[in-house]
Image (cartoon, helix red, strand yellow):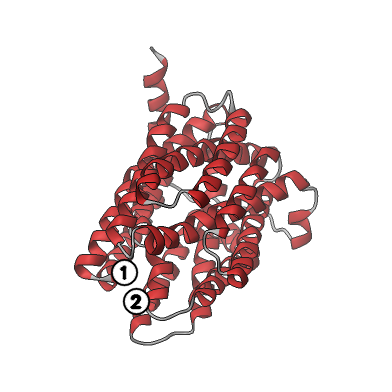
Amino acid sequence: MHKHPHQHLHFLVNRELNELYITVAIRSFALAMITIFIPIYLLNIGYPLPTVLIFFAIASLTQVVFTMPAASIAAKYGFKHAIFFSTPLLILFYLLLYTQGHVFWILPLLAVIAGISNSLFWLSYHVDFSLFSDKKKRAQEVSFAKVSSLIFHVLGPIVGGFLVVLLGFQFLFVLVSILLLLSVIPLFFSKDVQTTKRYSIKDVFRGQTKRNFFTFFGCGIDTGVFLVFWPLVVFFAIYKNSYTGLGMISSLGLFAAMVWILIIGRIGNKYQRFMLRIGGVANSVVWMLKTIFLGPIQMLILHPLHGIAQATIAVPFQAITYDKANKSKILKFIMFREMTIHMGRVFLFLVMAMVTWLVGSFVLGAGASLLYLLF
């Protein structure tokens, strides 16, 4: 009975983590309103499916290539500053995307801008979390971070869906840009962290295990299917061009994930690998079920289950990642993580650009989910 106040006090006094919690919560709400609708938006303004998938492949390839420069920028100016630098680029991406309905910008340029922004943000975020999280409470801290973002993330797709219907994509782009600017303010309530370490591409991959490589590669495929192909199937095949339907089913899955994270966060430190294995198998099974049961009623059951399976993966996967980073060289390991995850996504998007069978991506997601068992 006396442990719980102490645990909450721990979160409150860890200023660096609190800043990350707030930043990611605001950023999650902003991006949750729009990210799920981006592939649909590109298709609706006239781009064919293979072109849209090549767009995502280029964005992921940019993250692979730009991870090295992103690490150098973060090391020189500080990881919080790198997160700050990522924000204007992401806003620029959305503003250029906003003009796509009127002026057809070169789509690969937008993909490169998005890739550079995401490289700066996620590399810096994961290094910062690795540095300031407590090994003994890491699973709980990961849970707290995810719940903090999911509380707002749950509302994002619903709000975004209604705003698209009522006011259009243009209004949504502007609102998201404003929220992204606000999200970086909490980061600078404490000092930034810099490092003098630099790594070559050979350094990053030297000493890394095949098990880690294939786990991160599989994570890239699994999350890529969830972020891009799942919304397309729901929007076009299940809810028949309904933005509100897609928003509501997405929020339902996120709500189930949030509740489940609250439950498993307390036991995460003791049973990390067991939970990861259970989550990987469950996630694989749900992906396969989604290839068979594609009706709107079935999705009301399957998608919350999918949210629970992904939450069962996410908490131990992140916690183990930070444990491994702290046992080696943090920046080097996080660079390896980011590059390998996006190699998986490049593979996914290029394969599916040739196949163009949306539901077939669920089969790839099912297979990739089993690679979590290697971690």
Image disc number at residue 60: none
Calculate the distance from the C-alpha at mark 1 to the C-alpha at mark 2.
7 Å
Q: Is residue 347 above or below residue 270?
A: below
Q: Secondary structure at mark 2?
A: helix
Asked if marks 1 and 2 touch (Cβ < 8 Å), the reply is yes
Three-letter amino acid code at the position of disc 2: Tyr
Callout 2 environment at 10 Å: few (<14), some (14 to 19), or many (20+)? Answer: some
Residue 35 visible, this angle: no
- Mark number displayed over residue 98: 2
Q: Nearer the viewer, residue 372 or 243?
A: 243
Spot occupied by residue 163 in the image (x, y as percentages of width and height): 23, 63
Residue positioned 51% across, 24% down in the render: 267
Say whether residue 270 is left or right of residue 26: right
Label 1: how many residues lie within 10 Å, few (<14), some (14-19) or many (20+)?
A: many
* Residue holding disc 1: 173
Q: Nearer the viewer, residue 253 or 374?
A: 253
Instruction: Report x, y in % for residue 369.
Output: 61, 45
Query: Which of the 4 image quadrants contains residue 166?
Result: bottom left
